[in-house]
Amino acid sequence: MTNVLQVHDLHFSYHDGRPALRGVSFAMCAGEKVALVGPNGAGKSTLMLHLNGILPDRPRDFVHGRGEVSVEEKRLTRDNLPVIRALVGLVFQNPDDQLFSPTVFEDVAFGPLHMGLPMKEVEARVESALEAVRMSGFRDRLSHHLSVGEKKRIAIATVLSMKPQILVLDEPSAGLDPRGRRTLINLLRELPITMLVSTHDMKLVQELFPRTIVMDEGQIVADGQTRDILENEELLTAHGLEKP
Amino acid sequence: MHFDAFDRYHETNSFVHRLDPRIKVAVTVAFILSNALLPDGAWIAFGLSWMLLLFANIFSNLGIAFTLKRSFVALPFALVAITVLFSIPGNPLASFHFLLWDLTISDTGFLRFVSILIRSWLSVQMAILLVATARFPDIIHALGHLRVPSILTTIIAFLYRYLFVLGDEVFRLMRAREARSAAAGRRSGRSVVWRANVAGHMAGQLFLRSYERSDRVYNAMLARGYAGHLETINPHELRRRDYITAALALLAILFLQLAGRL
Amino acid sequence: MQYSPAPLHIPDGFLSLVVSIICWVISAITLSAAIARSNKSLGERQIPLMGVMAAFIFAAQMINFPVAGGTSGHLLGGALAAITLGPWAGMLVMTAVIVVQALLFQDGGLLVMGANILNMGLVTAAIGYGLYRAAAAGNRTLKLTVAGIAAWLSVMAAALFTSLQLWLSGTSQLQIVIPAMLGVHALIGLGEALITVAALTLILQTRPDLLGENSASAKGSRGWVVAGVLISLAVVLLSPLASADPDGLERVAEDLGFLGKGFSAPYQLIPDYTLPFLGQSNLSTVLAGLIGLIVVGAVIVLLGQGLRAKS
Ligand SMILES: Nc1ncnc2c1ncn2[C@@H]1O[C@H](COP(=O)(O)OP(=O)(O)O)[C@@H](O)[C@H]1O
Ligand SMILES: [Mg+2]
């Protein structure tokens, strides 16, 4: 099977000079659902930002970094940034950062609109993305009137409307009540798309993801079947994780 | 928590709610302009303007006194106009002694003072009706259609979106401050300067958080294909009833102007 | 918690049409320049930055501190916005705040919004930034001191501009409105200065890079210093002058054609079908008639389009 995503020897430091990524390599196959776990500050969010070329594109924050990222065999460079960003749908941890428009429609339409699609197609994509997250009636709602759970689902819709090949979610279940969490889990299970999800929610990992990557201090310390990793108590305690 | 105190839109189904937001913005501005053009003491025209306003209230399904009940926000500012009561020459209406001064209210001064208040009071009511019947994002679209530069409308859209988020943050900061000063025993705590410093510290904290948030928002925009040029959507289309309402409103306002000059 | 308006927002009805329009023109020209220039100093991240920072100013204005007798002080923010974001971006941010306050909260009118933008957004930013920029090379104490003075002066200038507009509109008497407005705002300005300095102190401690050499704050040109100093001088010199010799200023305004006899002229653009600046002439009557015709024409066109849109 071909790799949709390939990351090779990625290094990165923020402007304070402390390394946040120290040689990260892994690959993902089409249709795979992978969990990314590790303590706070491990570098999960930083890694995810690299997957659609955000940090290297911002010289202000970019001190030194190297390595490469390829999506569908295309190497991420400045020239194909727009293509890669359409292929990798990145959902940020805080939905108030992700949803920056006054209305749900404007937010879900933002991606397709900036891909240069015609208005008809944009409308159609908004409809189907909202349907995919079961929020069809919410098109004309104001973002600030949504509950946290609704915001998280709309946030996923904002990238689904770009029809990405890979969905990258940063701590999607953080801050949700049990019902919101349950709805989200069902949604993630049903979405037929390759997925990389960072989380501290080990029950969610156990329930949804066949494969788990463990990160700590900017490096991948384990990568394998979720079953095996959750059995390895030594590994879990060493990296501040808990058995579900 | 939601900051619903900031919401001014009143959801209901009415003729005015269904109008295109551009028409509502244009008519509101025309009405306020008309008030400014009416001469002092044009009582009949002022009265007719109020009638127009009452009709607008009725057609909005919000109750005839909707805007009246909310219209006193501008009243405190009336203080700055109080001097016209005494300063404009005319026939004296009343004189009295206040502290050091002997003050005489002239009839022209009184006329002018009351006219200023009425103009202000009418204008503010129409503005209240505008935000009660058009959702703010739609008003932003209307501004775009009416040629307000897109960079300004975009900043306004962001401001509107993050008003609620940052409003929440301010609320939490102030709650924490109150909890601390209550724990310290005295309600307001030490000197005014010290309190101003605490407020400034809060503003600084809020600044830094907002700055970092703008960075994350920028990342979120980049991730969805933003490359420095912002596409905007203008989902509104003018229909027949919009044109006709605009025309009738303009005619009514023209009539008000004539009535004010008879 | 209540959203608390600053006491400078002029509502509709308090300024004459002529003064409102002049202020709109000045503001519009300045804002066009701001739109053209802010792009250069901030690049493509300017939109989210200015948008979120506009929300910040709005929210920061709600932070209040009790002063005495149930009154409370709070921030206007023009100086702070211009010092931290640069003058042009500061102006745009303040403008967005004033627009939302007027449209959403009726805090300040629509027809007079040009004046409110000028007073609270443009003048405050020019003074705040201009004076701060003059001290930008100095040490931290100097910078903060100057920022405090600039914040105080920015509020005083806004109050002075507001007073002048009210007087030119025939709404207030000069010898009362200037001492009253400036007296009140001398105190309000102290709050502004204290909050601005405390906020800047924290920012300089935590993120000095935001105010450092490569920041938007450092990129404003030296011309701002001149503008800031000039407006400040105007405030410092004009205020006592105006209070001491109001007749002098009134004579000037009369000569410039602002004030007609007994406050009547400025706010009637087409009184009795004559245009005030043309006097009681035939031409004036004809022009007034023309304006009426244009309005009627616009109505007819709109009606026609409405009927056509049916099909
Ligand atoms: N914008 C930033 N500027 C400087 N350092 C940062 C920034 N974002 C994250 N870091 C640092 O990079 C490291 C990795 O952070 P992050 O990727 O957010 O970890 P995680 O998502 O696993 O919690 C941490 O040490 C964090 O402090
Ligand atoms: Mg993280």
Image (cartoon, coloured by chain):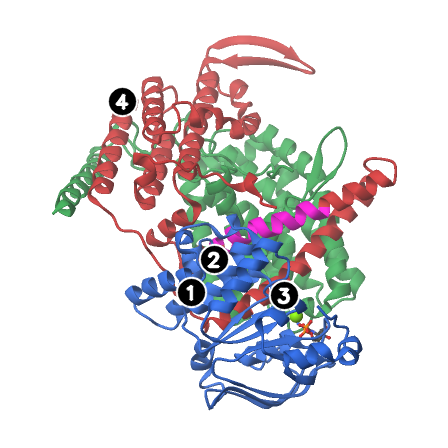
Chain C appears in which tint?
green
Q: Residue A41: say if magenta.
A: no
Q: Could you tell me if the residues under marks 2 and 1 are in contact, i.e. CB atoms within 8 Å? A: yes
Q: What number is the disc on residue C41?
A: none
User: Answer yes or no: do the residues labelled 2 and 4 have beta carbons within 8 Å?
Assistant: no
Q: Is residue B154 above or below residue C183?
A: below
Magenta-colored span: B156-173
Q: Colour of chain A?
A: blue
**Residue where numbered disc 4 is placed:** B259
Q: Sort mark 4 into few (<14), some (14-19) or many (20+) by Cα contacts within 10 Å.
A: some
Give the x, y percent position of residue C242.
60, 36
Quote the CA–CA distance across marks 4 and 3: 54 Å
Residue C165 locus on image (x, y percent): 51, 38
Residue at figure coordinates x 58%, y 75% from the top left? A209
| Identity, as a three-letter code, of the amino acid under mark 3 | Ser
The amino acid type found where label 4 is placed reads Ala
Disc 1 designates what residue? Answer: A110
| Residue located beneath label 3 in the image | C217
The residue tagged with tag 3: helix, strand or loop?
A: helix
* Principal secondary structure, stretch drawn in magenta: helix
Please identify, in this view, whether the residue under mark 2 or under mark 4 is nearer the observer.
Answer: 2
Instruction: Name the residue type under label 2.
Output: Ser
Q: Which residue is mark 2?
A: A101
Distance from label 2 to label 4 (Cα)?
45 Å
